[in-house]
Image (cartoon, helix red, strand yellow):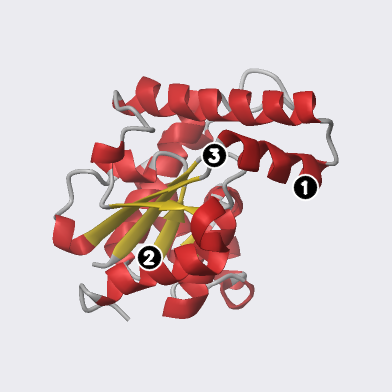
């Protein structure tokens, strides 16, 4: 097993850093889009998943099958048509995907409590990274990306991080922003995305991962 988790402050560019790390290592990125795609596949009949195998990354298909078999209760229809799954159900889906992906290895897992879910696996098999930047730099990035005013961008950044902190505390009883939970903390305002990615890859290579 070899897995990197990336926890990030909103606007610090953690998702982009994770993509660059995965590209440099030749690994797979497990992010919200990937988890959603796995969940969608897992909700399909097994024969449909098999028929779509060539159009779906093999890891995604494997995770979908494992998820459908191990926790079919997460696919029980919600009370009303069109009603989104509750947070606990989404957390259950995410946790299954993260654990199965980590068992596969050679994955970079972005957000969704990945570090907390995998906190107890041996340190030799996981590298937990926290991607940060000063608040003003993150707010500026959000302004540019979402075309928002400074107050609106600050509100989005602060509320998004507060929601993520609450999610991790609710389901795992951990502080997402505690640096003691991570092997490595990188500041993208100082290192840039490429520098942060290179630093993470260097730490991974010291473990013999490539």
Mark with earlier residue (2, 3): 3
Q: Secondary structure at mark 3?
A: loop
Mark-to-mark CA distance, 2 and 3: 19 Å
Residue located beneath label 2 in the image: 200
Q: Quadrant of residue 102?
A: bottom left
Q: Residue at x 31, y 62 (%)?
A: 3
Q: Residue 72, how many percent across, how many down?
A: 43, 40
Q: Residue at x 49, y 67 (%)?
A: 195
Mark with earlier residue (1, 2): 1
Task: Mark yes or no: residue 113 visible.
Answer: yes
Labels 3 and 1 touching (C-beta < 8 A): no
Labels 1 and 2 touching (C-beta < 8 A): no
Q: Secondary structure at mark 2?
A: helix
Task: Name the disc covering residue 37, or none.
Answer: none
Q: Residue at x 27, y 67 (%)?
A: 2
Quarter the C terminus occupies: bottom left
Task: Name the disc covering residue 134, or none.
Answer: 3
Please give left or right for residue 101 compared with residue 166 in the image: left
Task: Mark yes or no: residue 34 visible.
Answer: no
Picture layout, residue 42 above or below residue 135:
below
* 19 or 57, nearer to the observer: 19
Picture layout, residue 210 above or below residue 117:
below
Residue located beneath label 1 in the image: 145
Q: Residue 66, how many percent across, how many down?
A: 38, 55
Mark-to-mark CA distance, 3 and 1: 17 Å
Q: Secondary structure at mark 1?
A: helix
Mark with earlier residue (3, 1): 3
Mark-to-mark CA distance, 1 and 2: 24 Å
Please give left or right for residue 12 compared with residue 89 in the image: right
């Amino acid at each position: 097993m070899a897995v990197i988790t990336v926890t990030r402050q909103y606007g610090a560019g953690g998702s982009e850093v994770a993509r660059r790390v995965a590209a440099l290592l030749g690994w797979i990125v497990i992010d919200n889009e990937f988890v959603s795609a796995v969940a969608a596949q897992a909700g399909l009949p097994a024969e449909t998943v098999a028929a779509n195998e060539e159009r779906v990354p093999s890891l995604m298909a494997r995770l979908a099958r494992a998820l459908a078999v191990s926790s079919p209760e997460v696919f029980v229809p919600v009370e009303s048509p069109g009603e989104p799954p509750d947070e606990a159900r989404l957390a259950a889906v995410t946790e299954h995907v993260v654990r199965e992906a980590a068992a596969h290895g050679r994955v970079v897992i972005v957000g969704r409590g990945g570090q907390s879910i995998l906190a107890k696996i041996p340190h030799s098999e996981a590298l937990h990274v926290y991607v940060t930047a000063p608040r003003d730099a993150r707010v500026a990035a959000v302004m540019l990306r979402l075309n928002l005013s400074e107050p609106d961008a600050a509100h989005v950044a602060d509320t998004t991080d507060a929601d993520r902190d609450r999610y991790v505390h609710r389901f795992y009883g951990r502080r997402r922003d505690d640096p003691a939970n991570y092997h490595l903390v990188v500041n993208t305002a100082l290192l840039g995305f490429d520098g942060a990615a290179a630093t993470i890859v260097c730490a991974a290579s010291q473990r013999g991962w490539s």
